[in-house]
Image (cartoon, helix red, strand yellow):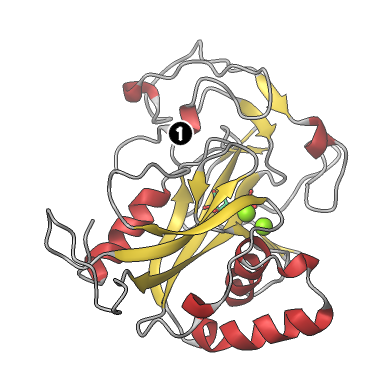
Amino acid sequence: AGPHVKSRCPQYPGSNIKRLSVPDDKVDWTQKWPEYEPVSYTAPSVLNNPAWADPDIGSFSPKFNTVDGGVDRTSFEGSYKVENGKPLNPCGRTGLAGRGLLGRWGPNHAADPIVTRWKVDVKGAKVHHSDSKKPVLQFVSIMRKDCGEWAIPGGMVDPGEQVSLTLQREFSEEALNSLSSSPAERAKTHQRITNLFKSSGFMVYKGYVDDPRNTDNSWMETVAVNFHDDLGNSVSELPLEAGDDAGQVQWVDLDSSFPLYANHSHFLEIVAKERKAHW
Ligand code: RP5
Ligand code: MG
Ligand code: MG
């Protein structure tokens, strides 16, 4: 897939911190760079000791490469190195040390629900793309409040939480605004989408996310799963409403030219290929 790119974005998100510029051929840790000494940055929101964050290293030595008291510190990328008590990003240098905005040292596990349907015309017939002649898929996309970019409505796996639950929970929170609805409404939503989410779905991707928040010592990993409403009579009929860290939500056509957060385009490309849809 080539070296990570967004993990080396010059300006670290939500701060005035600039990363050290890492050339493509120096991303890999095995490339010698003795003078490499990036600045260290951990956001105040992380240092405040919220429940979702680890304490600072020194007072704290987590069990890396294991499931450590409910917190999954294993990586889909294999065993990662730990240097001077700090885990090393398996995809190489990012130009920034510390944790930045991420709570966990090492992998920060997320889940990405990719909910799709076929694009149809007023008569209900599938719409084919004029260039590729292939049917067009649509997915539920949210605009992230933190950066304004369109993204899959994913979120963090809570300690001990089953990924299947994270997928459904994050979708409900960000695309159906379940956090703001009454218990009765929430139960109804739950019922409506449980059928779709209880199908095993199509496993799209498991591994490193090229996320702009990544650092040399903390990085995002995800499990992306596609839940497809083939007949358009399941989630397609639910009113979408942005919630939690989502500012907007809408059905978006799958198309290679549409810019998305992190490497989410890569996940959608896999879905399009699998379903023989336009990309
Ligand atoms: C990305 O960040 C993942 O792919 C997922 O979509 C998201 C999870 O982080 P939050 O949405 O909780 O910030 O790396
Ligand atoms: Mg969320
Ligand atoms: Mg989220």
**Residue at point 41%, 80% (across, down):** 229
Q: 208 or 127, which is in the foreground?
A: 127
Q: In the visual, does 56 lie left or right of 241?
A: right
Crowd around label 1: few <14 · some 14–19 · many ≥20 (10 Å): some
Q: In the visual, does 169 lie left or right of 31?
A: right
Q: 204 or 208, which is in the foreground?
A: 204
Position of the C terminus, as image quadrant, is bottom left
- Res 206 → quadrant: bottom left
Q: 6 or 268, which is in the foreground?
A: 268
Percent of width and height locating residue 275? 25, 72
Q: 47 or 268, which is in the foreground?
A: 268
Number of on-image labels: 1
- Which residue sits furthest top? 35
- Res 158 → quadrant: bottom right
What's under tag 1, amino acid-wise?
Lys
Residue 148 position (above or below residue 116)? above
Disc 1 C-beta below 8 A from ligand 1: no
- Which residue sits furthest front? 122
- Where is mark 1, residue-wise? 6
Q: Confirm whether residue 65 shows in the render.
A: no
Q: Confirm whether residue 98 shows in the render.
A: yes
Percent of width and height locating residue 118? 32, 72
The image quadrant where one finds ligand 3 is bottom right
Q: Secondary structure at mark 1?
A: helix
**Residue at point 20%, 69% (across, down):** 276
**Residue at point 63%, 76% (across, down):** 165
Percent of width and height locating residue 85? 68, 37
